[in-house]
Image (tube, rainbow, N blue to C red):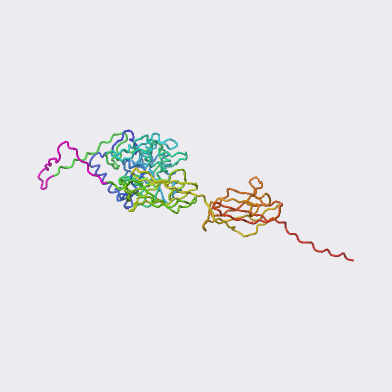
Amino acid sequence: MAAQFGRRLRKGAATTAVAAVAVAALSASQAPGVNDHGRQTAADATPSPEASASDGSATGNSPYYTDLPPLKSPNPSPSTGPGPGGTGATEAGIPATVLDAYKKAETALREAKPGCNLPWQLLAAIGRVESGQARGGRVDADGTTIKKILGPQLDGNGFALIKDTDDGAYDGNSSYDQAVGPMQFIPSTWAWAGRDGNGDGKKDPNNIYDAALAAGHYLCRNNWDLSQQGDLDRAILSYNNSREYLNLVMRWLEFYRKGTHEVPDGAGTLPDNRSDDGASPTPTIPGATTPAGSTPRPGPKPEKPATPQKPGGGGTTTPKPPTTPPGTPSTPPATTPTPTDTVDHLEDAGTAKLTAMAGDTFGKRISTRAETEAGKAVAKVRVRFTIVGDTDTTFTGGESVATVATNSSGVAVAPALQAGEKTGAVTVRATVVGRTVPGLDYKATVTERAADTLARTGDAALTCAPGGEFANQVEVKATYNGAVADGVAATATLITSADDATASDKGPYFKDADGKTVRTLTGLKTDAKGLLKLPKLYADDTTGTFLLRITTAGGATLTVELTVAAAETSSPSASASPSA
């Protein structure tokens, strides 16, 4: 969560009557758990297993701003002036660069993960709650915040306990992690969720373009469809595992869906109340707003609970004398270890050899078992699988990180791997979420695309006269195990003979871009349908039968006969004898 916006003001109802009006208004129009269509929403949502601070949540469950959207809808599109729109018009304004970043992120996700259905208004709602839209749009021309936005250190004192994971690289704190940037990512999450949204070659959590795109991908993981309320709830809870947070984000999402407008960078409104203030959010109602520049009066202090009475109204209850002598230290209550606390190590659970061709899905999946020191399986432990190193191989869904809970046998099975185009070794590391035990590395191999069969697509004879041009081009189709073999590398060579695969120095030939004679073509690839059409063939003055050999990665080979022969000429008819 962002640091304080200068001197943070706390809103309060001027009188108890105003507070009562606010509560009544909220109950009638925007009560948590019910939206404008009357459907049930966040209030009854149960946090999903994916949602926990120790599970690499975006914010580490850091504090957030609790200001509620105005009761008055910004629809139709509000004006930027003070007018009758009141606070609704002000709150609906989003700084220009920040708004542009949200919309660009939505566009990118629409192409990368169309099934997610991410609305940019969701990013705006989270950006509002996390940092007040990058402190009211205080960003430079590239979208980087003028000053770093840092949440409190997560030292377990009122917050989650997350010890330093980045050596202070992002948050400047080498003891504990802090949420960073306008979308408030903790460093350990940014390490795998970070994206380059502005194309400058860097992944900077302080840049609104990078942070917005990262937030979009984060919310779209696990094949969630955000047009479905259940998946939307799970995605928001995974960002910050709090029902109050879920309700608040949903309220801002609905508000922004009804209308927003662009305001200059640096001119956005700043929130006042934060979830760690100890002050509950105060609704904005017509006629109860604080004039600009004035200091709001604190609301009424909560009354102390009445002293318990004896049954029958016999006055206060006399306290019992202490059972332990003064000065004796109290014994802390015993705590029951969680399943994660009992994990001593990870073991491979029978993972088979992991090999796939580029572009294919791996047929086998990684299986890991969590065990105690005595070798007993531990269920309900979250295991994180991370693809490390320079590779474009991902899990299905396009992510490089997946978290899976162990089953009753203590086994967690990772999602299937999707091979990229980079060939070679790939490392997948399994670690226990919330427990420091050695990770377990798995090796996978991505091989080049291959074909095992080549066949001509036509059967026309390939003939040519000396010094001429072959009428038909050679086209072949590549398959692998009977399926189309697309993107397979191939080579075509006019060979010397069936027993000598070296390039011939006479007979048919291809031409390069400069028109020069070429008898070997490299760098060829089959298309999406497994087809490969060779360039035109030409013939020199040598006649005879020649061989064209095509080979592919994977060992497929096809030899095609080419004939160069002079055109047949008809014999002249016998001359008639001269007449007498």
| Image position of 55 (left or right of 297) | right
Q: Give how far across and how far down residue 543 sits, in percent.
A: 71, 54
Q: Give how far across and how far down residue 86 sits, in percent.
A: 33, 41
Q: Nearer the viewer, residue 551 or 376?
A: 376
Please say whether residue 208 is one of the residues in the magenta stretch: no
Please say whether residue 314 is one of the residues in the magenta stretch: yes
Q: Nearer the viewer, residue 551 or 305?
A: 551
Residue at the far front in the pictured view: 374
| Image position of 554 (left or right of 381) | right
How many numbered circles are shown?
A: 0
Q: Give how far across and how far down residue 223 sits, in percent.
A: 40, 51
Residue at the far right in the pictured view: 580
Magenta stretch: dominant SS? Answer: loop
Q: Is residue 306 visible?
A: yes
Q: Is residue 217 visible?
A: no
Q: Give how far across and how far down residue 466 sits, in percent.
A: 71, 53
| Image position of 418 (left or right of 456) | left
Specify the quadrant that holds the N terminus. top left
Magenta residues (range):
309-336
Q: Is residue 95 above or below residue 498?
A: above
Q: Quadrant of residue 124?
A: top left
Specify the quadrant that holds the C terminus. bottom right
